[in-house]
Amino acid sequence: AQSVTQLDSHVSVSEGTPVLLRCNYSSSYSPSLFWYVQHPNKGLQLLLKYTSAATLVKGINGFEAEFKKSETSFHLTKPSAHMSDAAEYFCVVSASDTGRRALTFGSGTRLQVQP
Amino acid sequence: NAGVTQTPKFQVLKTGQSMTLQCAQDMNHEYMSWYRQDPGMGLRLIHYSVGAGITDQGEVPNGYNVSRSTTEDFPLRLLSAAPSQTSVYFCASSYDRSGQAITGELFFGEGSRLTVL
């Protein structure tokens, strides 16, 4: 079965400093991996996805993530945080080993950006 | 385009009442799904559909029914509401037609906040 662990429930950074949101996954099959962002009282929006092409994936708003199979990780980074990045971020895995076409979501990391 | 539209945005029910959360998408997506979001638990899949007339259970299906009579609509029914169903519900759709796993983007509605007293 597949699973996702987001290692930090809350991360606080200062504006202009780097962002690192950590995600580890478990899957019996080659997974597709996603990061979604949720702003307050909104639905989720796709930031980026990995589907077995390049291991370094670039997304919207300057975010990127690197797929590391040996470490089963898919950490999200951004060189310089902006106030508008404050939101909740979800790491998501999709694989075919459940027999069910579904995504498995991590529990989320709330990013705070201090001025 | 409207994308994925959910109604109502807010609803308060008493224990034992029934109601339907509506979801409609105008992107001609085959795949539609319902999730519930609870604090500290991410999103959990309730039911999903891979096309009109085809539905399947997700991770937490008990207490919920769905149907898919058209490509556009995927309503979620609570037959007898319980306080444990207090949550925020999201409908999401995808164009993804590939095999078993989902590799494409999910498009989400803005959510329906349900409180059961």
Image (cartoon, grey):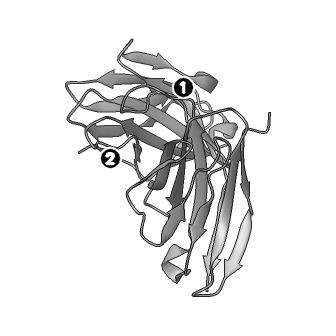
Q: Amino acid at mark 1?
A: Phe
Residue A59 x/y as whole percent: 55, 22
**Mark with earlier residue (1, 2):** 2
Quarter where residue A29 is shown? top left
Relative to A90, B87 lies left or right: right
Q: Chain of mark 2?
A: A
Q: Considering only vertical position in the picture, is B82 above or below B5?
A: below
Q: Quote the CA–CA distance across marks 1 and 2.
A: 19 Å
Residue A19 x/y as whole percent: 50, 33
Give the number of the disc on residue A63. Answer: 1
Q: Considering only vertical position in the picture, is A73 above or below B81?
A: above
At 68% from the left and 39% from the top, the residue drawn is A83
Identify the image quadrant of the N terminus of chain B.
top right
Q: Badge 2: how crowded within 10 Å, few (<14), some, or many (20+)?
A: some
Q: Chain of mark 1?
A: A
In the orientation shown, which residue stands out farthest toward the right?
B1
Residue B114 x/y as whole percent: 64, 71
The answer to which of B17 and B51 lies nearer the viewer is B51
The answer to which of B26 and A27 lies nearer the viewer is B26
Q: Amino acid at mark 2?
A: Thr
Q: How many marks?
A: 2
Identify the image quadrant of the C terminus of chain B.
bottom right
Give the number of the disc on residue A5. Answer: 2
Relative to A7, B14 lies left or right: right
Quarter where residue B111 is shown? bottom right
Q: Considering only vertical position in the picture, is B17 above or below B97?
A: below
The secondary element bearing badge 2 is classed as: strand
Give the number of the disc on residue B115. Answer: none
Residue A50 x/y as whole percent: 41, 23
Same subunit: marks 1 and 2: yes
